[in-house]
Amino acid sequence: MHEFRFEPVQMPESETSLRRQVREFLAQEKANGAMPLRHNSWSCYDADFSRKCGQRGFIGMTWPQQYGGHEKTPLERYIVTEELLAGGAPLGAHWVADRQSGHQILTHGSETARRSILPRIAAGECFIGIGMSEPDSGSDLASVRTRAVKVDGGWRITGTKVWTSNAHRAHYLIALVRTAPKEDDRHAGLTQFIIDLSQPGVTVRPIYNLYSSHDFNEVVFEEYFVADEMVLGEVGQGWQTVTGELVLERSGSDRFMSTYQTMLESMRMIGPQPDERSAVEIGRFVAHLATLRRMSSSLAGMVERGQQPALEAALVKDLGTTLEREIPEVFRQLIPVQASLGEGDSYSELLGMSVLRSVGFTLRGGTREILRGMIARGLGLR
Amino acid sequence: MSDMQEDLIKTVDRVVADACSKAVRDSAENGQWPQALWQALEDVGLPKALLDETAGGVGLGFTDAMLILRRSAYHGVPVPLAETMLAGRSLAAAGLDVPEGPLTVALAAPGADLAWSGSVSAPVVSGTAPRVPWGAQCEMAVVAGELDGRAMIGLVRCTDANVSEQRNLAGEPRVSLQFNGASLVAAAELALAPQRLHTDGALFRTVQMAGALERALQHALDYASERITFGRPIAKFQAVQHMLAVLAGQAAAASAAADMAVDASVDAPDEFAVAAAKARVGEAAGRGAEIAHQIHGAMGFTHEHSLHYVTRRLWSWRDEFGGETWWQARLGRMAAAAGPESLWPMLTRTLAA
């Protein structure tokens, strides 16, 4: 059996000053009116805010300076991102690029790709989408059918990606593509490419979500040309590189803090002297949050030690997204306010959006069922 | 985990293998004090593991001592190891000598105190301490209260109380001790002594539950791999795999929460961390035990199978030293009074930052 151990981490000496920097920055932004109440900070797109994060050195924190990074440790990055999330900062524009794509480019990209893209991400001026799922491939990611054919100097890609958040306003996409026919080893023959969305041969079409908002898209490739230097890693090694990317996608504190603002606003509605039932429910969530934070920071420690905690990340994401979904479900029973549709600042709308958005928490980044399958494999059951 | 920590675990495993057979467990539940098991634990110094050498202990340090406690709970040993450690830690904190043998802690119901009277040099104690663990088997118990406006801790003889015996769901003695002017064997001032003992008790139960849940998971994994139904081990069914994944998640959360509370409580119990951990682990105990039993089917409902030695303890320990609701309400009031702006500093332990 795989032993799930969440060793404690020793926070760096810079912890206090980093937290203070972020808290001061957010206080200033709030005072300037640049940060209205957000229901879900890391899904909230705000390019201006991302540029400010870039200027503050809050993006690409762990990357080398030559690529615009700040050479901080993963734990230092963890501290800054959890502070930004806790403050409800609108991080959606640069979130994917900072969380996973930049790391993929740094670790597996060509020198050209690193030099041309990473400094712009770190400056908060370049945004990236995730090109994994397809119309017929979601949980079974290895079954992707978008294919690339080798041509002189590069590849021509044909196929369709779906559920691509922000593709209509991102600069790049990292796409998982089949570069060799499927063999017995279905994980072989896949490759990740950096796709420049401004080039011809790629069309982005909106997919409106259940509350009629345009967040994700369908992305269609027709003989799209991508140069060799935009390949990530070795051709055919895409399964290994995408697995590493998924660990980054799943392991952060974003996976239990999506409704943290709803928690805070609900506490504000309930006030400083809760009745017994409200006190119990608030306390239960505080206990869960404290535990998840312990587990999540432990994951950051594993990443810092060079490990790839895929199973631990799956386990924390399963627990974390369960909590995220419970928060609006419980508070709606404690506070006599009916949920409304709309993206305004009222508690009614905040609650409404949390209920509607919650649907996605246990889908995006790997469904609960896929995660539990991974955990079962880790337990030696598969 | 360090080599020394692995050795500590092996030591506990060896003592249990040698001295804690099913017959010993069952006779302990029937009221027989398991002297050979207790002696074996004392022979390797475990009940005094967390005491300094000057206090007659082994000087292992709190974290390693909690690892021993957790492993003892993994095995569901039917002796007051947690209570003896807890009593020793509290007496040592007040600078009092720790007597030999098994010890327990006699607390008043939450919110109430035992009444202390007499002089500081010769205090006496009155009142009822309900459900004292192993109260009839231990010669002495630690008590706490207030005397002349000072928080006090002391030692009292259990034989000086009227005793009415009950058992928790695991068959462990839980005894109501009624003191009526019982003289203290020793006493000293200790800041916030009653709360401190109660919170420390919750911490120790949290650590024990994390260990017991780990064993419940191991039992469930073993059984799911052995039990053949419809021509294959039930572990091969996706529905069963998902149940085990949820159980593993609860066990991992319990483990992390218990570690969090231990790390924060090396010198004295940390109210916030213990409250969060006792509440979270108590919840995990209920959910985890339910799944472990569902996996075992009717076999887990029998006395013959060993699963119940840990699940009955989980169902008992989650209630003791404050159940989930008690600690959740406490945490919730703490958080609400501080206000939403202070929740994050509270969670990150940076309230002053």
Image (cartoon, coloured by chain):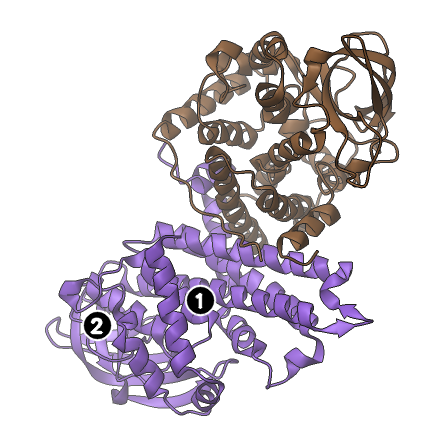
Chain on which label 1 sits:
B
**Residue at which label 1 appears:** B208
Say if residue B131 shows up in the picture: no
Nearer to us in this view, B20 or B287:
B20
Give the side of residue B1 with respect to residue A46, left or right: left
At numbered mark 2, what does the secondary structure look like: helix, strand or loop? strand
Contact between labelled residues 1 and 2, with CB atoms less than 8 Å apart: no
* Residue at 84% from the left image edge and 7% from the top image edge: A200
Determine whether, in the image, residue B4 is placed left or right of residue B125: right
Q: Along the line of sight, which residue is nearer the eye, B37 or A265? A: B37
Q: What residue does disc 2 label?
A: B154
**Residue B208 found in image quarter:** bottom left
Specify the quadrant that holds the C terminus of chain B.
Answer: top left
Where residue B273 sits: x, y (%)?
A: 42, 51
Identify residue type, mark 2: Gly
Which colour denotes chain A?
brown
In this rendering, position of residue B165 left or right of residue A219: left
Q: Residues within 10 Å of mark 1 (few under 14, many from 20)?
A: many
What residue is drawn where x is 46% and y is 25%?
A23
Say whether residue A211 is visible. yes
Q: Residue furthest left?
A: B121
Q: Check the image and report above or below for A24 versus B285.
A: above
Disc 2 or disc 1, which is closer to the eye?
1
